Image (cartoon, rainbow, N blue to C red):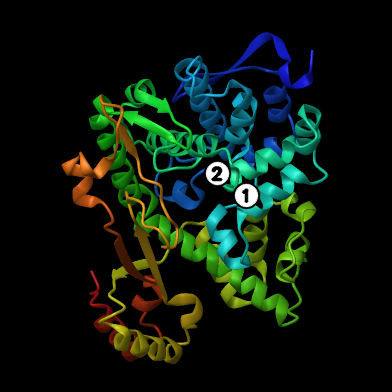
């Protein structure tokens, strides 16, 4: 029997708090899970710094990746199987892409990417196509198979239906992380009737569509996503921790470029500091390594790096004030000057952070980040875009919500042992008072 068709002699299961069980019968999937590149995802938190706000949010990219795989497995094995629109020959490709879709995420994910200016999806592709254990497994399934998997994850594959199962406005990725993140943060916002949605999914040539009878379950899913973004993902305390994380990495990079002598050489960062990250170095990085450096950098001579690391490690985060950059840019300029007079470098201690989300949108050709809409399958066989049938979705469709916060170290500003008058002016501008 060909390796791509090989089944395990006995089904393997992972006990899962969201889906109850994750089922594995395919040899290829089992072998991929056992690779060192996939096991690395155990050491990458799904929600980055959110554990400093919601203490239960310690789950990993490994958990999530298995969850996405399981949802896709259920869709194609239980719902799509036997339907003429579904090509069962694409089953293994779909399962592998679902399992590996987050393979390239690094420690603290998006914050780390922004500092060093790279995209984790590039590393996902590099891992799948490079000299890795993952590549060896995929190559055994077919010479061109690694490239096919990489194309699905990158959304460049011609197999649009397969892509939409993993990346669309209603995909297995979102359905897993909303429920999983809600479970581990202890909130109820991310709950929706996934069982109902799976039952009413139907394959079409270029995307998954939803039977009209399942519209209300989809409305619930979209509102769950909206609430999770503003109550969990964009929580201002979590964002404060991200600000600190980002500033620590920026400071370390700036010091390296200034030929600063570190007490402990940051060897794991060298290729990133040189803006030439290589796969071998990237795969050695996980959150345990990052936190190790944050611990030892508390002993550095540089006062800023030392202080920022102390704050992150001990959860002494920046406070925040509401901020409107369009109307308060003059205030920001004044604060910058006052921070300098107070011996606080505004580059590291006065930070504007913005959060923005578009909960649902219909197709807008030519716009950045074009989004294929969710289509409802009517009894007549006609496809109708979701917001044309749902008043709830129509009310939020295409409406981007943006929020801005100004982060600052409250303890420094309230400490009047030095620069008392300047700090009083800072507090007045920030409109904060001593308790």
Q: Earlier in the sequence, mark 1 or mark 2?
A: 2
Q: Quadrant of the N terminus?
A: top right
Question: 330 left or right of 246?
Answer: left
Q: Residue at x 34, y 76 (%)?
A: 414
Which quadrant would residue 150 be assigned to in this image? top right
| Residue in the foreground of this view, choosing between 409 and 18 | 18
Measuring from the top left, give residue 120's x and y in whole percent: 62, 53
Percent of width and height locating residue 394: 21, 48
Q: What numbered label is drawn on residue 287?
A: 1
| Image height of 22 relative to 165, above or below | above
Q: Nearer the viewer, residue 266 or 360?
A: 360
Name which quarter of the figure residue 250 lies in.
Answer: bottom right
Pointer 2 residue: 45
Question: Circle 2 — which element?
Answer: loop
Residue 322 at x, y = what percent?
A: 27, 70
Of residues 265 and 199, the one drawn nearer to the viewer in this rendering: 199
């Amino acid at each position: 029997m060909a390796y791509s068709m090989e089944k395990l002699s006995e089904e393997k299961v992972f006990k899962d708090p969201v889906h109850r069980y994750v089922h594995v019968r395919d040899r290829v999937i089992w072998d991929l899970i056992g690779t060192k590149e996939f096991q690395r995802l155990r050491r990458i938190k799904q929600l980055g710094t959110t554990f400093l706000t919601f203490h239960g949010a310690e789950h990993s990219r490994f958990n999530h990746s298995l969850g996405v795989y399981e949802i896709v497995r259920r869709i194609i094995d239980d719902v799509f199987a036997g339907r003429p629109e579904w090509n069962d020959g694409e089953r293994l490709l779909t399962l592998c892409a679902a399992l590996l879709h987050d393979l390239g995420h690094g420690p603290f994910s998006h914050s780390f990417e922004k500092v060093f200016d790279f995209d984790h999806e590039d590393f996902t592709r590099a891992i799948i196509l490079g000299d890795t254990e993952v590549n060896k497994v995929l190559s055994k399934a077919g010479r061109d198979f690694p490239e096919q998997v990489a194309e699905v994850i990158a959304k460049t594959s011609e197999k649009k239906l397969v892509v939409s199962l993993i990346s669309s406005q209603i995909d297995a990725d979102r359905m897993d992380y909303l429920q999983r993140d809600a479970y581990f943060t202890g909130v109820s916002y991310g709950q929706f009737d996934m069982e109902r949605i799976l039952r009413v999914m139907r394959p079409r040539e270029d995307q998954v569509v939803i039977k009209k009878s399942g519209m209300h379950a989809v409305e619930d899913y979209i509102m769950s996503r909206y609430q999770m973004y503003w109550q969990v993902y964009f929580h201002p305390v979590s964002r404060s921790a991200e600000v600190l994380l980002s500033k620590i990495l920026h400071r370390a990079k700036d010091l390296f470029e200034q030929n600063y002598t570190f007490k402990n050489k940051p060897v794991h960062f060298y290729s990133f500091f040189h803006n030439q990250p290589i796969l071998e170095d990237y795969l050695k990085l996980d959150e345990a390594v990052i936190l190790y450096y944050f611990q030892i950098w508390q002993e550095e001579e540089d006062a800023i790096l030392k202080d920022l690391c102390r704050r992150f490690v001990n959860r002494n985060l920046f406070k925040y004030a509401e901020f409107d950059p369009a109307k308060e840019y003059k205030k920001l300029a004044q604060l910058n000057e006052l921070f300098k007079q107070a011996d606080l470098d505004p580059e590291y201690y006065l930070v504007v952070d913005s959060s923005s989300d578009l909960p649902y949108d219909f197709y807008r050709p030519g716009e950045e980040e074009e989004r294929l809409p969710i289509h409802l399958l009517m009894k007549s066989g006609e496809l109708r875009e979701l917001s044309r049938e749902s008043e709830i979705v129509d009310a939020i469709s295409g409406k981007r919500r943006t929020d801005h916060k100004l982060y600052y170290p409250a303890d420094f500003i309230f400490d009047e042992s030095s620069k008392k008058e300047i700090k009083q002016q800072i507090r007045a501008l920030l409109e904060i008072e001593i308790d």
